[in-house]
Every structure is written in structure tokens, then in C-alpha cells.
Image (cartoon, rainbow, N blue to C red):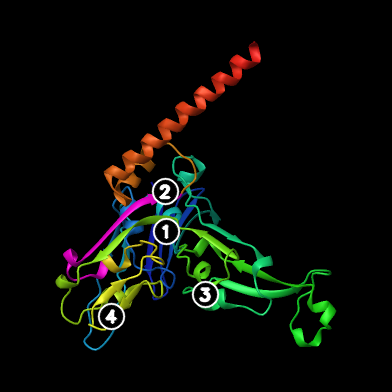
Amino acid sequence: MPLKTVKKDAADKLTLEWVLHVKNYKLTLDKARCAGCQICSLACPKEAIKLERQPKIAGQKAKKAKVDIDLAKCNFCGICDITCPYGAIKVTVNGEHAPNVIAKESYPELIRDIKVDASQCPKDCDDCAEVCPLGLLKVASRLTFDGKPVTDLAALSPGDRKHVQLNLAVQKEYCPTCRRCEFKCPAGAVKVRKAFEGKIAIDQSKCPEGCKDCLDVCPITDTLILGENGKVNVNEAFCDYCGACKAVCPAPEALTLTRTKILHTPVHSGTWNKALARLTSEEASVQELTAVAAKKRKDAVARRFVFEEAIR
């Protein structure tokens, strides 16, 4: 049992803490990065995380749902940390970022598959940095022959300019893989695989008149778009299926969102299987387990074939 427990809810962050004899567990929620989505609350095995809809003030945009964490239920396992698509939650032990479920290999890590081919980037282009809705891209031009940063291209000779190449830095730990940069950049310059796949649909006939709460809170620009009829339309190309829209929708039957697949590192555990069912569906969970079992059988047959060939 902890010697001391602490919970602080400040304007910029929510902090939970366990103080033990030799260990100090801390969970920090960065409210600026938090999208008020559903992922952490669904993934939490202790049901310690809840979403609270914020009151709507007339004439103002809707506010994203507030995330609250019950200190009495939280055991600092780190599942919320690992699963958050925005990297808004961090769990540390004695100041080190080391979620227990990763150390015990009982839970997978979310894969943020982002590949950049700087050779395909025009030298004077920074469109990807401008289009990123979360400001996670930074472009810097550097001389390839000596590695020194270039601050003024006009000061270089035409010959030297040929050796300038863009260096694109991506803050992957905070990237929800919306693919806005990929769509904006020249073909082949940036390739992104979504960490979450799924389906989202809006039944406009069931939307309250004049309501655009989902659009107000969506963290990814141009995923939800206001049509000429005043109703919200969906552009799934950029949707990361976080559920921030679903969390604030006043008419639950108007907006349907289903996650069908999660891109993650290999793992086989009851903890992950249960989380997967909550985050996606029982059907999607069964499909993944079936695929994993099939791969294991295939690998076993391959190993047996290699062994039999070796002893002949």
C-alpha cells in the first residue's frame, strides 16, 4: 500500500501519484495534448478513467470532453499511456518512463508507422509542417556535405544549393497518424499507416438542428466538414477514429464510430485481448486472435520443414 497518494487537477495538467518506500509512481495527463477522446477510458482495465461532457455555452464552440481519473482505482499500469494516440498521458516510476505492462511484456506498443523520404521533398517546401493540425512537424534545411544548418538559401552559391536537403523531424510519440502530411506532400515523400482503422458515419437526419459539436472538438482539421445545409459531413481520409466527436455528440444515435483494427507490436496476453475487445469489438478481437493463431501454425510448419530438410 502506498504511504501517500496525491491527485492534483490544474488548468494545464492532471497529476496522480503514489508514494511508496522505494518507488514513486506518477501519472500525468497533459490537457493541451489531450483530445478528450475515448481511447484511454476504453483501454483502462480498472475503469478508472471517465469522460465528462462539458456544459455548452450559448454562442460558443463546444468544448472537448474532460478526462478524469479515479485515484482509488488507478494502479499506474501504463495502459492509458501506451494506447493514447496523442501521447497525452505519461506514467513514470521514480521519474523514469517505464510502464509496467511494457516491462512485463503483457501489453503491446502502438505503432506509429511514419516514413519520410527527404529526397522526394522540394527544397523550398514546408507544406507538411503547415498542414499538420498538431504542429508535430518541423522542417530544417541543411548542407549535406558538412552538416551545417542553412539559414539563408539566397546567401549560397548555385553550386552549394544543389547539396541542400530538407531534414524533416516528426514528433512520433504525439502523432495520431491522421495522414494529413502524406496527402499534402508530393507522392512518395511521406508515407503513413494509420494506427487505428475503422468506420465513422453521421446520420444527418438525427443531428439536432444547428448542432456541430463534433466538428468543434475534432482535433484533426478537415476530418469533419460543415456542409452548405448546415450539417456535418465526414472525410474519413484523415480520421484517426479517436472518438472525440462521439464523446460530445448530444444525439448518440446520430454518430456511429467503430474501430476495426489497431496497428501494434506483437503480443499475446489476456490483458491485451480484453482491451482490444473494448477498443474495437468482440468480432475484431476474434479476427485478430484467429490471425495470430494461424500465423503460429504456419511458422510451426515452416520450422518443422526446415528441421526435416536439415536431418535428411
- Residue at the image point whose x is 48% and y is 70% from the top: 180
Of labels 4 and 3, the one closer to you: 4
Indicate the secondary structure of the residue bearing disc 1.
Answer: loop
Q: Earlier in the sequence, mark 3 or mark 1?
A: 1
- Could you say which is closer to the camera, residue 99 or residue 274? 274
Circles 3 and 1: CB atoms closer than 8 Å:
no
Q: Which mark is residue 35?
A: none
Circles 1 and 4: CB atoms closer than 8 Å:
no
Around disc 4, counting alpha carbons within 10 Å, would you say few (fewer than 14), some (14 to 19), or many (20 or more)? few
Of labels 3 and 2, the one closer to you: 3
Asked if 156 appears above or below 297 in the picture, the reply is below
Q: Earlier in the sequence, mark 2 or mark 1?
A: 2
Instruction: Tell me which segment is drawn in magenta.
Output: 247-263
Disc 2 marks which amino acid? Cys
Quarter of the view holding residue 218: bottom left
Residue 133 placement (x, y as % from top left): 46, 74
Mark 3 = which residue?
135
Q: Earlier in the sequence, mark 2 or mark 4?
A: 2
Circles 2 and 1: CB atoms closer than 8 Å:
no
Q: Earlier in the sequence, mark 3 or mark 2?
A: 2
Mark 2 = which residue?
77
Mark 4 = which residue?
227
How far apart, in angstroms, are the residues tagged by discs 1 and 4?
30 Å
Q: Which mark is residue 84?
A: 1
Indicate the secondary structure of the residue bearing disc 2.
Answer: loop
- Residue at the image point whose x is 29% and y is 73% from the top: 233
Disc 1 marks which amino acid? Cys
Disc 4 marks which amino acid? Gly
Of labels 2 and 4, the one closer to you: 4
Is 307 one of the magenta-colored residues? no
